[in-house]
Image (spheres, rainbow, N blue to C red):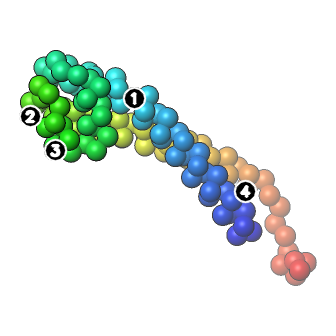
């Protein structure tokens, strides 16, 4: 029983990490571009995206043409992308949990005296 829990946990961890990573990497460029444009940024989006990896003021300060308003907007865009990605992982985990509950309800009870 504990082996199946370990395997299930490892598989679920891999699935959740994959979902999170794929969703975040597809979401962050558009979120960052939108936030930076609204804040008046006209510099290199590639440099801004590179700085968003660490999401620190020191990394953003190395981007040419950046202002404190753009830094704040970029940091918020990263946070929004994180939250949206974790929300998706939560929904997937909720679906797996629902399936597990239904599967548990469909199992038969075994008398402990018959168990070896």
**Disc 1 vs disc 3: which is toward the camera?**
3
Q: Which mark is residue 91?
A: none
**Whole-Å distance between the Cαs marked 4 and 2?**
53 Å
Q: 10 Å neighbourhood of mark 4: few (<14), some, or many (≥20)? A: few
Q: Residues within 10 Å of mark 3 (few under 14, many from 20)?
A: few
Q: Position of residue 47 (x, y in %)?
A: 25, 29
- Asked if the residues shown at circle 4 and circle 1 are in contact, with their CB atoms under 8 angstroms apart, the answer is no
C-alpha span from label 3 to label 4: 51 Å
Q: Which residue is mark 4?
A: 104
First in sequence: mark 4 vs mark 2: 2
Helix, strand or loop for disc 2:
helix
Q: CA distance from mark 3 to mark 2?
A: 11 Å
Q: Secondary structure at mark 1?
A: helix
Residue that numbered label 2 is attached to: 68
Mark 2 crowd level (few <14, some 14–19, many ≥20, 10 Å Cα): few
**Mark 1 vs mark 3: which is more N-terminal?**
1
Position of 61 relative to 40 (above/below)? below
Number of numbered discs present?
4
Quadrant holding the N terminus: bottom right
Q: Judge whether 95 appears above or below 64 on screen.
A: below
Q: Quadrant of residue 110?
A: bottom right
Rounded to the nearest angstrom, the CA distance separating label 4 from label 1 is: 36 Å
Residue 41 place in picture, x, y as percent: 15, 21
N-term mark: 4 or 1: 1
Q: Which mark is residue 27?
A: 1
Pair 4/2: label in front: 2
The picture places residue 91, in percent across and down from the top left corner, at 51, 41
Which residue is the site of mark 3?
58
């Amino acid at each position: 029983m504990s082996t199946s829990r370990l395997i299930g946990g490892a598989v679920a961890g891999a699935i959740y990490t994959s979902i999170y990573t794929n969703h975040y990497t597809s979401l962050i460029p558009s979120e960052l571009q939108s936030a930076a444009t609204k804040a008046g940024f006209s510099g290199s989006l590639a440099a801004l995206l590179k700085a968003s990896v660490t999401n620190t003021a020191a990394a953003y300060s190395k981007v040419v043409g950046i202002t404190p308003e753009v830094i704040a907007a970029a940091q918020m865009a990263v946070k929004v992308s994180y939250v949206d990605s974790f929300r998706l992982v939560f929904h997937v985990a909720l679906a797996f949990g629902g399936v597990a509950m239904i599967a548990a309800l469909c199992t038969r009870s075994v008398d402990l005296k018959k168990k070896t």
